Image (spheres, rainbow, N blue to C red):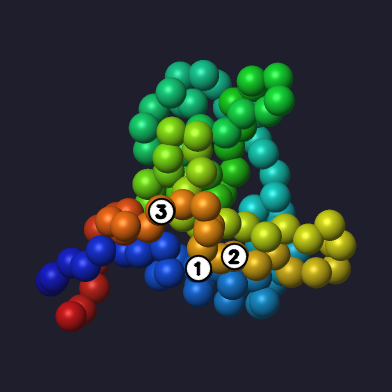
Amino acid sequence: MKTRPVTPHDVIAPLNEASKLDPAAIRALADPRVPRNCAFADQLTVAVGRTEDGDPRLGMIRIINGLLGADEDAYGPVRANIPEDLGESVTFSMNPNIDQSPPNSIRSSASP
């Protein structure tokens, strides 16, 4: 089986589709910032997020961006657009503030 890089674009489309199918579930996964310990915050796979007080936090988008290659400020290529109106769906897009060249990627099994 051959592998190909998984790009941020590969991640965004299924997230947006899932958000259309079950907006409440995706909002519940994308919006919260769960407290985490400092040892976990210092590892390299998951993007580090912190509150204004400096407490480490974790959310689904931080995990995805950590895998895709977040920068030192924990900003990654995938952005969650979370509307204030709870009736509106979360949408996902490319983060325009992140340089995508060379593209960050993880490996995935896929047919050519």
Q: Is residue 80 visible?
A: yes
Judging from the image, what secondary structure is the residue with disc 3 in? loop
User: Mark 1, mark 3: which one is toward the viewer?
Assistant: 3
Residue at screen point 85% across, 61% down: 86
Q: Is residue 25 visible?
A: no
The furthest residue to the bottom: 112
Residue at screen point 67% across, 60% down: 81
How many other residues sit within 10 Å of disc 1, few (<14), some (14-19) or many (≥20)?
some
70 left or right of 108 in image? right
Write down the residue under mark 2: 92
- Judging depth in this view, the residue of 57 and 104 nearest the camera is 104
Q: CA distance from mark 3 to mark 2?
A: 17 Å
Q: Position of residue 65 (x, y in %)?
A: 46, 49
User: Mark 3, mark 2: which one is toward the viewer?
Assistant: 3
The amino acid at mark 3 is Asp
How many other residues sit within 10 Å of disc 3, few (<14), some (14-19) or many (≥20)?
few
Residue 99 is marked as 3
Tag 2 and tag 1, C-beta contact below 8 Å: yes
Residue 12 is marked as 1
The amino acid at mark 2 is Phe
21 left or right of 71 in image? right
Q: Position of residue 63 (x, y in %)?
A: 48, 45
Residue at screen point 35% across, 64% down: 7
Q: Quadrant of the C terminus?
A: bottom left
Judging from the image, what secondary structure is the residue with disc 1 in? helix
Judging from the image, what secondary structure is the residue with disc 2 in? strand
Give the quadrant of residue 66.
top left
N-terminal label among 2 and 1: 1
The amino acid at mark 1 is Ile
23 left or right of 112 in image? right
Residue 71 is marked as none
Tag 3 and tag 2, C-beta contact below 8 Å: no
